[in-house]
Amino acid sequence: MTRRWLFADQLGPHFDVGRDGVLLVESRRALGRRRYHRQKLHLVLSALRHRAAELGDSAVLLRTDTYGEALRELGEPVRVYEPTSRSAADFVSRQLENGRVEAVDPTPGFSLSRNDFQHWAGDRRRLRMEDFYRFQRQRLGLLVEGDGHPVGGRWSFDEDNREPPPKGADHLDVPAPYRPREDDVDAQVRADLDRWERDEGLETVGRDGPRLFAVTRREALAALDRFVTHRLGAFGPHEDAMLRGDWAMAHSLLSVPLNLGLLDPVEVAERAVRAFHDGDAPLASVEGFVRQVVGWREYVWHLYWHFGPAYRSRNGLGAREPLPQWFDDLDADAVEAACLSDVLAGVRDRGWVHHIPRLMVLGNWAAERGYDPDALTEWFQTRFVDGYDWVMPANVVGMSQYADGGAMTTKPYVSGGAYINKMSDYCGGCRYRPTVRVGEDACPFTAGYWAYLDRTADRLEGNPRMARPLQQRHRLADLDAAVEQERARGAAAP
């Protein structure tokens, strides 16, 4: 008899529980090791406890200080699936040596095994997302013809999915996303977190709030169905757009149940593809969503292991600034810049904003200010409800901050206020003007962009995609003034 120990991100039916039952563990030390968003802890605990209730007598739920204590209390060896973090993998390896873990099986939480990814990577000099994504589509038979060519003649419809928000609209004209109903389990989780914060020194950040994301298999399937049936068609055109009155836009809100292991990524992608073949969703929207699920998400997972533990410490642009207190504490009320204030408030109130506010507002701001990428990775991992050890290093160090020297992307993702003005409704009501670099009305993103280029010019020299903006900075008569202005701003909230 060997139980299966399932971690809190391995809760779906594709993580086979076997006939001998499962072990689930709530580790107080794991919950308190970092300063997590309050709603993130709620989601993890609610998901664990709901799964234990579903499994009934076949599950043992232990609430202990550490994982090691739980294994000793259980008193019998367990089998595990590959964990999703190095620290957990190292712990499991030690338990293999002492006999408390009997075997480690490949994770069914991703469509491609780590060994198969290493075979694909081989001796490639470049591990580009577009190459991996094409490989995934062909391997899984998603949106491909019988001869292996892409449906519609293109592998990516990204150019069709970059529309700004509709003019004059304060929200997209799409049905609301699936909203779960809290129950007694959620109430007990909330009471426990209140008690631990009050009596035991648990430190969290962000506001508590009603649960917005699925934490059970039933809820996850309902969320998937509602997205595909009612929202997928609008997802593609406006996936890069932002509206201050519409935090969800047409996004799926499936990253939480996917990262809790409640949904199989292939079933999610296949459900979207079926909608296209049934004539219920346009190709560009479906392709964009499939790219997120079996392309980018799995690419980031494999790069976490492929690049190794030192990757997170890469700092190719020499960014050393500590995160200012207002940023670290999610103090949106201290910020006057409309876009940054609203996005930071979204993180404070929900622990979630979609990928463009993450990349082009939060990440862009951090890059322009030279925040330390390792500290920023920790911030994203703990402040976001879908953040995990494997999720954020490549997303932050590589994609957002270009701190890996181009191992992932071909250029930094930085921009001035013009991009935010084009893709959102923030600038119209902001005290700053996106076209102004110097002065009291100067947009901190616009001024910050040119200060960033000036600060990083020596390190970005030779990057062909940065040649034009680097050259353009020499044509700015007020460059020195903009650089000095941003230096004087320092760590102050804009």
Image (cartoon, grey):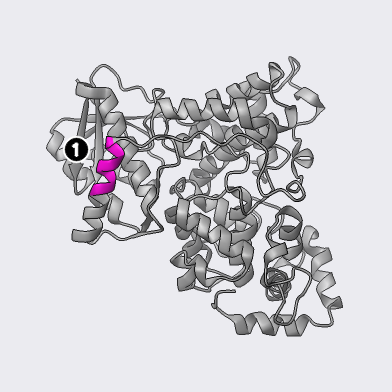
Which residue range is magenta in the image?
Answer: 184-191
Residue 233 among those drawn in magenta = no
Q: Nearer the viewer, residue 233 or 316?
A: 233
Task: Quarter of the image for the N terminus: give it.
Answer: top left
Q: Nearer the viewer, residue 279 or 267?
A: 279
Point out the residue furthest to the right here.
Answer: 475
Residue 226 percent location from the top left of the image: 55, 28
Snapshot quadrant of residue 284: top right
Whether residue 156 sits left or right of residue 19 in the image: it is: right
- Taking the spot 76% from the left edge, 23% from the top edge, the residue there is 151
161 is higher (above) or lower (below) than 247: above
Residue 441 percent location from the top left of the image: 72, 77
Say what secondary structure mark 1 lies in.
strand
438 is higher (above) or lower (below) than 108: below
Residue 467 percent location from the top left of the image: 81, 64
Residue 471 percent location from the top left of the image: 84, 71
Snapshot quadrant of residue 434: bottom right
The residue that disc 1 covers is 62
